[in-house]
Image (cartoon, rainbow, N blue to C red):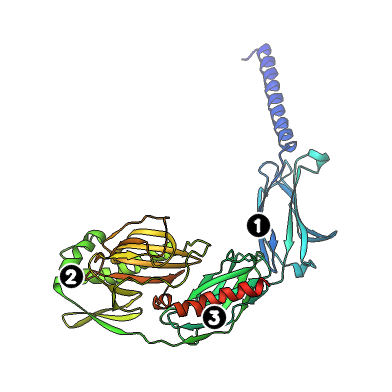
Amino acid sequence: MVSKEKRHKMLFWLKILVCFIAVIFVSSILFLRLESKNPNIGLKLDSTILGKVQEIEITVSDIRSGIRKIQIVLTQEGKKSFLLEKDYPAQGLLRISAMKKARFKIKLEPSEHGISDGKAVLSIVASDYSWRRWGQGNQVALERQVLFDTQPPEVVVISRQHNVNQGGAGLVIYTLSETCPSNGVRVGENFFPGYAGYFEDTNIFLAFFGLTHEQGPGTSLSVQATDQAGNSVQAGFYHHINKRRFRKDNINLSDNFLKMKMPEFDNLLRLDPAVPVIERFLKVNKDLRHSNYEDIMAITRHTDAKLYWRGEFMRFPNSANRAGYADYRTYKYKGREIDHQTHLGIDLASLAHSPVPAANNGRIAFAGSIGIYGKTVLIDHGFGLFSMYSHLNSFQVQKDQMVNTGDTIGNSGSTGLAGGDHLHFSIIIQNIFVNPKEWWDPAWIKNNISAKIESVKNSWNE
């Protein structure tokens, strides 16, 4: 039997425990309901300049008392357009919201909300279920000033004659009415960016472009521009594309050539020497060639926004043509056709290890080895124009070095997939190999490049 005195003591401590638990419970409720932390608002807006249609992403979170209300408003000249009003009911004993995090994607279409071009304010207001502010909860507001622009930019092509050869290059000069992060010339599926900075008027752009050896008459050409609000425009311009035919060539592979060349690539690609030599050659001529092309395009993707070169390009002195641009090569082994590739440059042969000059002024964009091309130098002549020198025995320049026309950059050789000492010379515009012969021709340079530039200088400086 428990004595009366002990029962009183137990009852006393039980009351103390109950009171303690009650105090903790009430304190927890008060702590939760009187919490002072504002809801969090996240806004994903790629640009504050908005076009005809713009999607914004908004995130609101409150991990304590939960979200009570969200309101999203667009205000222009005192007129309010409500994009979203959302209330979340209180739930449970504590009367808090079960919604701790809400995410919205809202499509902004100014025409649907009576918003005209010009400045406006985007406001996001959120409150929670705290007892603060006399029961109205903690409230936070996020505002962003935006500019609506639904009109496309204006493009005016100011260069006149655009006679282009299949596999050749061209230049278009044009003006833009506003800042356009993306602008340039569209040739079929290829895009060639335009560059400002050559003329004092920064609204005038130069865009060098090229046609592949497969792009003949009928290829679509236009100037395209997209402004900061995403509005796009496309402007055609007068042009004429001259059809060109390119040579076909047979390459007969000998066992001596394969035995001489393949060990270098066996090491590079970790090929099994036990595999028949012709299978290893095809791995190099197809897969490695494609990979090397991607490597070159990664280099030419980055160009200086400055025109370094002047006049016609210098040809490798005292050299003879050994293979032409866009030659369609059929590879044969023991009388059987095994592969087809297109030669995207001109092979020039002189005396062994002859000094190779820079074809024009520019910056060394690359000096190193590129698979089938062997030791290679790439010169950035600015505004997306590059020259390429391959199969070198050695090179005497380094990346980012400035060179002038005629400066020796290396010596001819037979590195890479070359059967004898020669120079493989290419001209590249952005990501297209074009015919180098045009760039050696002073008349072509004058008619297609320098005369256009001078005409614009004269007419726009008057």
Query: Could you say whether the residue bearing mark 2 is in a helix, strand or loop?
Result: helix
- N-terminal of the pair, mark 1 or mark 2, is 1
The structure residue drawn at horizontal position 81% and vertical position 40%, both measured from the top left corner, is 133
Among the 4 quarters of the image, the one containing residue 408:
bottom left
| Disc on res. 258 | 2
- N-terminal of the pair, mark 2 or mark 3, is 3
The percent coordinates of residue 122 (x first, y second) are 75, 56
Relative placement, left or right, of 2 versus 110 is: left
Q: Which residue is mark 1?
A: 45
Q: Is residue 298 visible?
A: no
- Would you place residue 441 above or below residue 98 in this image? below
Q: Which residue is mark 3?
A: 221
Query: Could you say whether the residue bearing mark 1 is in a helix, strand or loop?
Result: loop
Q: Are marks 3 and 1 in contact (CB under 8 Å)?
A: no
Tell me the kind of residue under disc 1.
Leu
In which quadrant of the rendered image does the N terminus lie?
Answer: top right
Mark nearest the camera among 3 and 1 is 3
Q: Residues within 10 Å of mark 2 (few under 14, many from 20)?
A: some
The percent coordinates of residue 400 (x first, y second) are 43, 55
- N-terminal of the pair, mark 3 or mark 1, is 1
In which quadrant of the rendered image does the C terminus lie?
Answer: bottom right
Q: CA distance from mark 1 to mark 2?
A: 58 Å
The structure residue drawn at horizontal position 76% and vertical position 69%, both measured from the top left corner, is 112
Q: Are marks 1 and 2 in contact (CB under 8 Å)?
A: no
Query: Could you say whether the residue bearing mark 3 is in a helix, strand or loop?
Result: strand
Among the 4 quarters of the image, the one containing residue 178:
bottom right
The percent coordinates of residue 414 (x first, y second) are 24, 66
The percent coordinates of residue 416 (x first, y second) are 26, 65
Tell me the kind of residue under disc 2.
Leu
Relative placement, left or right, of 57 versus 132 is: left
